[in-house]
Image (cartoon, grey):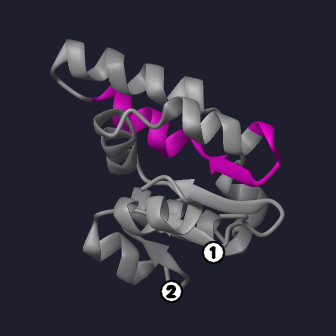
Amino acid sequence: MTLPAKLRVMFDSNAYDEILRHNDVDRIRALIEAEELVVVTTHVQEDELRQIADAEKRIALLGVYHRVGGSRIAPGDVITGDITYLSRDDLLAGVAKACCAALVTHDRALAECSTGAALTYDAFRQQVGLS
């Protein structure tokens, strides 16, 4: 399957669990290197992954986050207005809406507050030909 040039997505922190579970890091990196996929990140995903209590899981997921990589965007650079009191979900949703075609998440509340396109990881895998 050929993707539109530079499909831009943001992975919620829970999507990194799915990337690990499906062993998709190298396949996602190949899409990025082929310039078919751009991954946008913020400090929010990394902060959430760093707070995982289980050290083994935390290390594994941070490894996935860093191996997938992405273009890191500061929320204040793309969200208008005062972001001081926005929740993590609001920050992710705002950046995804401003910069991405889709937010990949299993968090229903986050998907609903994104007001943009949201995909489950399985739907993302299908869309990009990983399944």
In this view, the residue in front, 31 or 114, is: 31
Above-or-below relation of 33 to 126: above
State the quadrant of the C terminus.
Answer: bottom left
**Type of residue at label 1?**
Lys
Q: Which mark is residue 79?
A: none
Q: Is residue 39 above or below residue 78?
A: above
Q: Can the viewer see residue 3?
A: yes
Residue 50 or residue 22, whichever sits in front: 22
Residues at marks 2 and 1 touching, judged by CB atoms closer than 8 Å: yes
* Residue 97 image label: 1
User: Which percent across, then down, holds residue 106?
Assistant: 29, 63
Q: What amino acid type should be assigned to the residue bearing mark 2? A: Thr
Task: Name above or below for residue 65 compared with residue 71.
Answer: above
* Residue 115 circle label: 2
Q: Residues within 10 Å of mark 1 (few under 14, many from 20)?
A: many
SS for callout 1: helix
The magenta stretch is 33-51
Q: In the image, 94: left or right of 107? A: right
Q: Nearer the viewer, residue 24 or 63?
A: 24
Q: Nearer the viewer, residue 36 or 106?
A: 36
Q: Is residue 15 above or below residue 80?
A: above
In magenta stretch: residue 98: no
Point 44% across, 72% down: residue: 119
Count of marks placed on residues: 2
Label 2 vs label 1: CA separation? 7 Å
Q: Looking at the picture, how far across and down is residue 14, in whole percent?
A: 32, 48
Residue 62 image offset from top left, x and y in percent: 42, 23
